Image: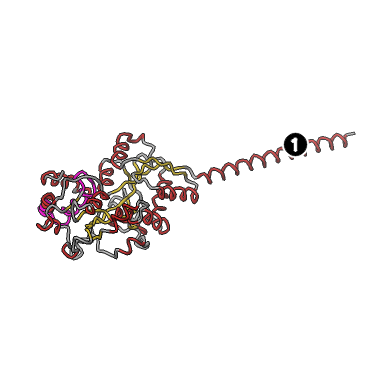
């Protein structure tokens, strides 16, 4: 009887231990499964961007596929996004800001909206002059500000520099955007940095004297005005002409095909080059994901897609430009740290106002 009782107790204990072991294994399995799902999700990163291109979204989706990190995008006008970041302060959910022009990036930095990002990957992929000295922003794509001309009415050899546009022969023939345009502000800021304020002021006054009309419209509008006969030459960013040449709009293609471009100052400082760039916000709560995103956008594969889709030049020197841009040939660009454009922005605006540039 005692042996039977002992056997029963032993068997009961065995069943109890087996049940506990099974429960523990099931619990452990759930924990492993949950951890795996968390790792696959990768978290998120919140982006404010002034770029409005479907191809950019495709790259963001590609980043999510590769890393599991969701990219939440808020689009807007560049200056409005900077103002929004400033207004939101540390309460902002934004982790990253993408905007056109180093002048704007420097403005965001000066308002303490960005923070430094230390990354060997970025430093390997992007030349030093396209990275802020405090590493608060980095260039992603670049564009040159060039001189467009009508092929049938202008001898390109007669214009070799930006200064040539102020010569008497171009009176009432120069088309250019307003002084409120950041691209023109940065162009003049580069002249201040390289040649001094007096030379920059002489140029601004000469441009005003030679304007074919009061400044109006964007870069594409200047191109269209040339073909319409309102002027013979215009100051434009290269990517606008690239997009027009490859547009689905036949009228834009027709306009662009009648124009040639000149890369100015090839015997001196080189053509003015600016960027579209990115910075991590002070308010970022997903800083590791934000850093991964910045690094991702500077890699060769992504740079090729990023630049070619919008006919911009890649900042990564190991990546070739789009075929249209290659057809224009290589050119010398200004060797100037782009943060200088922000430093001289206010003085550039003042000089334009003094010159009567509307």
Apparent side of residue 192 relative to residue 45 in the rendered image (left or right): left
Residue 46 picture quarter = top left
In the rendered view of the protein, which quadrant contains the N terminus?
Answer: top right
Q: Is residue 27 magenta?
A: no
Furthest residue toward right: 1
Disc 1 residue crowd, few under 14, some 14–19, many 20+, Cα 10 Å: few
Q: Nearer the viewer, residue 299 or 153?
A: 153
Tell me if residue 185 comes above or below residue 325 in the rendering: above
Q: Main secondary structure of the magenta part?
A: helix
Location of residue 165 (image quadrant): bottom left
Percent x, y of residue 105: 28, 46
Vertical relation: 195 (above or below) 71: below
Task: Read off the residue under disc 1.
Answer: 16
User: How far across and down, in percent of the image, does residue 258 sit?
Assistant: 26, 58
Residue 61 horizontal/vertical position (percent) = 46, 48
Q: Which residues are magenta?
A: 177-202
On the picture, is 329 further left or further right than 191? right
Q: What element does badge 1 sit on? A: helix
Q: Is residue 12 visible?
A: yes
Measuring from the top left, give residue 324's x and y in whole percent.
34, 61
Q: Where the C terminus falls, by quadrant? A: top left
188 or 316, which is in the foreground?
A: 188
Q: Residue at x 33, y 63 (%)?
A: 326
Q: Residue at x 81, y 35 (%)?
A: 9
Residue 197 seen in the current view: no
Q: Is residue 328 left or right of residue 287?
A: left
- Of 266 and 329, the residue lying toward us: 329
- The reply to whether the magenta stretch includes residue 195 is yes
């Amino acid at each position: 009887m005692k042996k039977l009782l002992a056997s029963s107790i032993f068997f009961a204990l065995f069943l109890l231990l087996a049940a506990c072991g099974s429960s523990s294994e099931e619990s452990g399995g759930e924990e492993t499964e949950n951890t795996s799902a968390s790792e696959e999700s990768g978290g998120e990163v919140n982006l404010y961007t002034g770029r409005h291109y479907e191809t950019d979204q495709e790259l963001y989706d590609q980043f999510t596929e590769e890393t599991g990190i969701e990219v939440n995008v808020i689009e807007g006008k560049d200056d409005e996004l900077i103002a929004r970041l400033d207004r939101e302060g540390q309460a902002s959910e934004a982790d990253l800001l993408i905007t056109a022009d180093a002048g704007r990036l420097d403005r965001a930095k000066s308002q303490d909206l960005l923070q430094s990002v230390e990354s060997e990957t970025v430093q390997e992929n992007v030349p030093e002059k396209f990275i802020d000295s405090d590493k608060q922003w980095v260039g992603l794509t670049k564009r040159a500000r060039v001189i467009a001309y009508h092929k049938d009415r202008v001898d390109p050899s007669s214009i070799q520099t930006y200064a040539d546009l102020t010569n008497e022969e171009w009176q009432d023939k120069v088309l250019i955007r307003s002084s409120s345009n950041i691209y023109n502000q940065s162009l003049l800021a580069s002249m201040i940095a390289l040649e001094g304020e007096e030379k920059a002021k002489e140029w601004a006054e000469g441009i005003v004297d030679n304007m074919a009309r009061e400044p109006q419209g964007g870069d594409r509008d200047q191109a269209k005005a040339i073909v319409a006969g309102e002027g013979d030459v215009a100051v434009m960013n290269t990517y606008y002409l690239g997009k027009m040449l490859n547009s689905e709009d036949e009228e834009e293609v027709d306009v662009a095909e009648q124009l040639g471009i000149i890369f100015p100052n090839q015997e001196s400082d080189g053509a003015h080059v600016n960027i579209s760039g990115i910075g991590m916000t002070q308010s970022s709560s997903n800083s590791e994901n934000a850093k991964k995103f910045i690094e991702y956008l500077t890699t060769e594969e992504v740079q090729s897609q990023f630049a070619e889709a919008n006919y911009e030049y890649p900042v990564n020197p190991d990546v070739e430009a789009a075929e249209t841009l290659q057809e224009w040939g290589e050119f010398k660009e200004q060797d100037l740290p782009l943060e200088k454009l922000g430093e001289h922005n206010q003085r550039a605006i003042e000089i334009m106002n003094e010159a009567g540039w509307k």
